[in-house]
Amino acid sequence: MISVKFGMLGRPGGGWGGFDGRPAAVRNFVAYSLNRLGVDYIDIYRPARLDPAVPVEETIGAISELVDAGYIRHIGLSEVGVETIRRAQAVHPIVDLQIEYSLLSRAIEDEILPTCRELGIGITAYGVLSRGLLSGQYSAGSSGDFRAHSPRFQGENLDHNLRLVDELRVVAQAKEATVAQIAIAWALHRGDDIVPVIGTRRRIRLAESLAALDISLDANDLERIEKAIPAGAAAGDRYPTASMAMLDSEK
Ligand SMILES: NC(=O)c1ccc[n+]([C@@H]2O[C@H](COP(=O)([O-])OP(=O)(O)OC[C@H]3O[C@@H](n4cnc5c(N)ncnc54)[C@H](OP(=O)(O)O)[C@@H]3O)[C@@H](O)[C@H]2O)c1
C-alpha cells in the first residue's frame, strides 16, 4: 500500500516555501511521484496541507480526475478541520484523514473524530509516540531535528511532559510492556477506524512497535493510562507557532 502526501514546496538551500494545491500542481506532483516510485498508480493520495489560496473543491476535483484516469486509487486528507472535510467529501469520497493523535494530542476527539465517524472516514494517526516523547527513551537535548523547535520539547514544557511519561512508565511496567508499546496500544484501542503510523529508523524499534498489536488493554488498564496522562495534560503546542497557523485542523 503506497500512501503519498504532496504539495509542500521547497527552497534552494533548504527551508519551507509554502504549499501548492492548484489543479495543475496536483497533476505535476502526481507525475513526479509516479516516476520516482516507479509505479503505475498510487493507493492513497492526499494534500499534505490545505492551500489557503485554492478552494479545496478544486484540489480534490483534480485528484478525482486522476482517480478516473487510473493513476490514484483513493483520496485522503491531512491536518484539516471539519468544514474542509465535509467540503472535500462532497466532491469525492474521502478514505482517511491523516492527523496527529496520541495520549499527548487528543484535540481531534472534540469535533474531527466524530465528523470522520459520521462520514465513514478512517483516521491515520501520526505522532502516536509524539515525535519520540512517548517512546520512554527521550531525554533533554537528545535531538537536533524538528524537536529542537517544537514547543513540547522546550524547557519547562519538556520537564512537565517527561514527568507525564514517567507516570505512564509505571503503568507500562505493570503490563510488562514498554512505554512506546502502551502509547501505541492505547491508540489502537481507541477504535477500529484508527490506524497508527509509527516512524522509526531502526528495525529493532519496528519489532517493538509491532508487538503493541498483541497488547490487550481492559477498562482498568485504560483508566490507569488516562490517569497517568489525562486529556489535555501536555505542555506546549504540538508545532511551532508559524506551523500551527498553517493547520486548518487547529482553526
Ligand atoms: N500528515 C502530517 O502532517 C504528518 C506529519 C508528521 C508525520 N507524518 C507521518 O507520520 C509518520 C510518523 O511520524 P513521526 O516519525 O514524526 O512521529 P512518531 O511516530 O510520533 O515518532 C517517531 C519517533 O519515535 C521513535 N520511535 C519509534 N518507535 C520507537 C520505539 N518502539 N521505541 C522508542 N522510540 C521509538 C523514533 O526514533 P528513531 O527514528 O530513532 O527510531 C522517532 O524519533 C511519518 O513517517 C509521516 O508519514 C505525517
Image: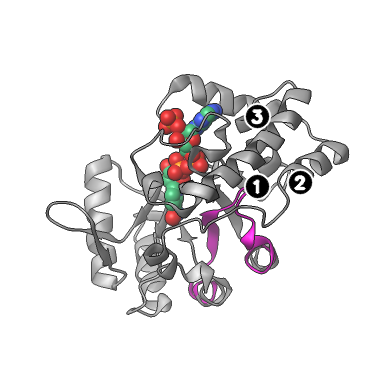
Side of 241 relative to 110 (left or right): left
Residue under the point 50% across and 24% down: 205
Q: Is residue 106 above or below residue 146?
A: below
In contact (CB < 8 Å): disc 2 and disc 1: yes
Q: Nearer the viewer, mark 1 or mark 3?
A: 1
Q: Secondary structure at mark 2?
A: helix
Query: In this rendering, does residue 175 appear at all?
Result: no
In the picture, residue 26 is in which quadrant? Answer: bottom left
Crowding near the residue tagged with mark 3, few <14, some 14–19, many ≥20 C-alpha atoms within 10 Å: some
- 216 vs 112, left or right, is right
Q: Amino acid at mark 3?
A: Ala
Query: Mark 1 sits on what residue?
Result: 103
- Residue 98 at x, y percent in the picture: 51, 55
Of 138 and 4, nearer the camera is: 138
The span shown in magenta is 88-114
Residue receiving disc 3: 212
Residue 234 position within the rendered picture, expressed as x and y whole percent measured from the top left: 61, 52
**First of labels 2, 1 by sequence position:** 1
Label 1 CB-ligand 1 distance < 8 A: no
